[in-house]
Amino acid sequence: MGLWTLLEGLLLLANALAILNEDRFLAPKGWSFNEVSGGARAKSLKGQLIGLIYATQYLRVPLIILNAIIIVVKLVSG
């Protein structure tokens, strides 16, 4: 497994986190941002994961650009 494969895997994981819908998926499972915002609960592992999910949702435009770059590189390289 090379560095390129690892970067592609991380990009796929970021894509998966970016498309999660709070109303349909996260809130019914207790993973709403409002549940852990502020206080000591934000420092827990669950709070940090929820923060990561919301951070990737705000970075959708850079993710689109990175996906386009990966697609072009894959098409050119073979």
Image (tube, rainbow, N blue to C red):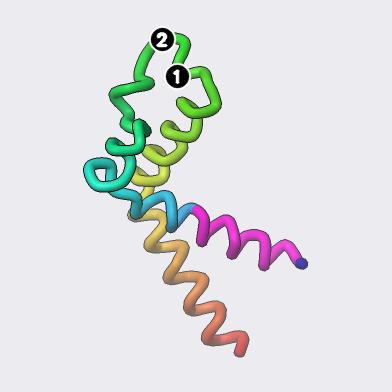
Q: Residue at x 52, y 86 (%)?
A: 75
The amino acid type, in three-letter code, at marker 1 is Ala
Nearer the observer, 4 or 51: 51
Q: For the magenta stretch, what is the residue range?
A: 2-13
Residue furthest out toward the top = 39
- The percent coordinates of residue 38 (x first, y second) are 37, 13
**Quadrant of the rendering where the N terminus is positioned:** bottom right
- The percent coordinates of residue 17 (x first, y second) are 42, 50
Real-space CA distance between mark 2 and mark 1, rounded to the nearest whole angstrom: 6 Å
Circle number at residue 42: 1
Residue 64 is covered by the magenta coloring = no
Label 2 close to label 1 by CB (< 8 Å): yes
Residue 8 is covered by the magenta coloring = yes
Q: Residue at x 61, y 90 (%)?
A: 78
Q: Residue at x 52, y 71 (%)?
A: 70
Question: Label 2: which residue?
Answer: 39
When asked about the image quadrant of residue 35, the answer is top left
